[in-house]
Image: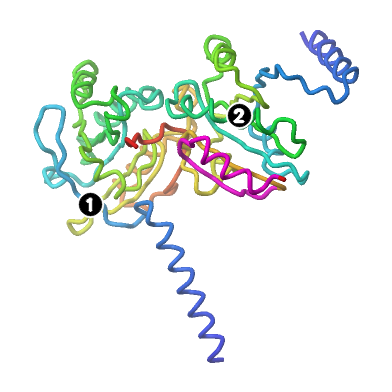
Amino acid sequence: MKTISKIAGLLMITLFSFGTLSAQGGYKIGDEATDFKLKNVDNKMVSLADFKDAKGFIVIFTCNHCPYSKAYEDRKIALAKKYAPLGYPVIAINPNDPAAQPEDSFELMQVRAKEKNFPYPYLFDEGQKIYPQYGATRTPHVFVLKKENKKNIVKYIGAIDDNYKDINDISNKYVEAAVDALLAGKEVEVKTTVAVGCTIKVKK
Amino acid sequence: MRIKNIVLITALFGILALSPGCKSEKNNEIKVVNFEQLEPVFTKNDDVLYVVNFWATWCGPCVKELPHFMEVYDQYKSNKKFRMVLVSLDDSDNLETSVKSFIERMNLKGELYLLDDIKKMNEWIPAVNPDWSGAIPATLVIKNGQTLSFDAKELSKEELLERITKHLQ
């Protein structure tokens, strides 16, 4: 009996360490997300803590150059317009190093934000300190956070919806469903999704 | 239309039957497929080492690494236990306008596919590899349904060779 519980214990430890190993890549559902202080396109620094009345956040790692990010631009704007008044503002963060992807420089972020009149902050992850903590691997990559006891808890990780190409043929609006559930005090049903996207660009 | 297709398919089979074992060098025909059509590459028990690369014309690091893949392809193409499969994730609407000309310009060889299965990304991305978030480029080395390596990043020629040479005689 003792041996069995020992083996079980060992197995648990093994499983646990595997769990943490894979978690090195970033947050899992239920983790507390870090706050940050990043420069917005208006040159002001922005933190999640600035949004005193927010119930949570739709954090989107996105950029200028990626065709998928571009394809979702109007949908990001629509998300911000719909959910910021409901307490879930969109926070866009460009995680790319402009030395590796010149189109994603801070100056060109400012140009794009002005052109499209972004209704949300578009922040620059200068020094690329924040995206690895979240575990973002591509653009666009969404993290829906909910404020619980002053902590920002990760509730959804993944894609905005299931069709980047044709907005008339979307079957699952993942982010909307997640935020709607949180607003209704319910559990998010689909907590993680994957989608094709551009790798985050790091200078070698 | 349907009859025309049948005639075409029959003709194609005829040509294939007439040229047994003829592995054409100029092999840059691209086929538009869904994941089910691509899946055998990931499961086949044929002792062949498959190098599978997911790319797109708009993906900078993909465009940078593809010449390395072609050099490696040229090195191993005569090895019957080696196959290279390049899977474009471009929008199928751009097949004629940009993908085909890109293939020509880059002189891409091996087996070329355009995976047109947007709505099922949440099925095939984890099926390709459970650790894949969908970021490209992504490269797998597979043999007999076993994934020997998976990289969701740009590979140098040395890195690619390192992943395949130890599995090839």
Displayed quadrant of residue B33: top right
Q: Distance between the residues labelled 1 and 2?
A: 38 Å
Judging from the image, the colouring scheme is rainbow
Residue A129 in the image: above or below residue A18:
above
Front residue of this view, candidates B12 and B154: B154
Q: What residue type is labelled 2?
A: Leu
Front residue of this view, candidates B31 and B6: B31
Horizontal and vertical percent position of residue B92? 56, 19
Q: Name the residue under label 1.
A: A34
- Give the crowd class for mark 2: few <14, some 14-19, many >=20 residues within 10 Å: many
Which residue sits at x=49%, y=78%? A10
Letter of the chain that mark 2 sits on in the rendering: B
Magenta span of residues: B145-168
| Tag nearer the camera, 1 or 2 | 2
Give the SS element for disc 1: loop
Q: Name the residue under label 2.
A: B86
Which residue sits at x=21%, y=47%? A55
Q: In this view, does B133 lie to the left or right of A70?
A: right
Camera sees residue B93: no
* Residue B94 falls inside the magenta stretch: no
Front residue of this view, candidates B24 and B158: B158
Is mark 1 in CB contact (under 8 Å) with mark 2? Answer: no
Q: What residue type is labelled 1?
A: Thr
Q: In this view, does A87 lie to the left or right of A184?
A: left
Horizontal and vertical percent position of residue B158? 52, 39
User: Could you tell me which quadrant the C terminus of chain A lies in?
Assistant: top left
- Give the crowd class for mark 1: few <14, some 14-19, many >=20 residues within 10 Å: some
Camera sees residue A58: yes
User: Could you tell me which quadrant the N terminus of chain A lies in?
Assistant: bottom right
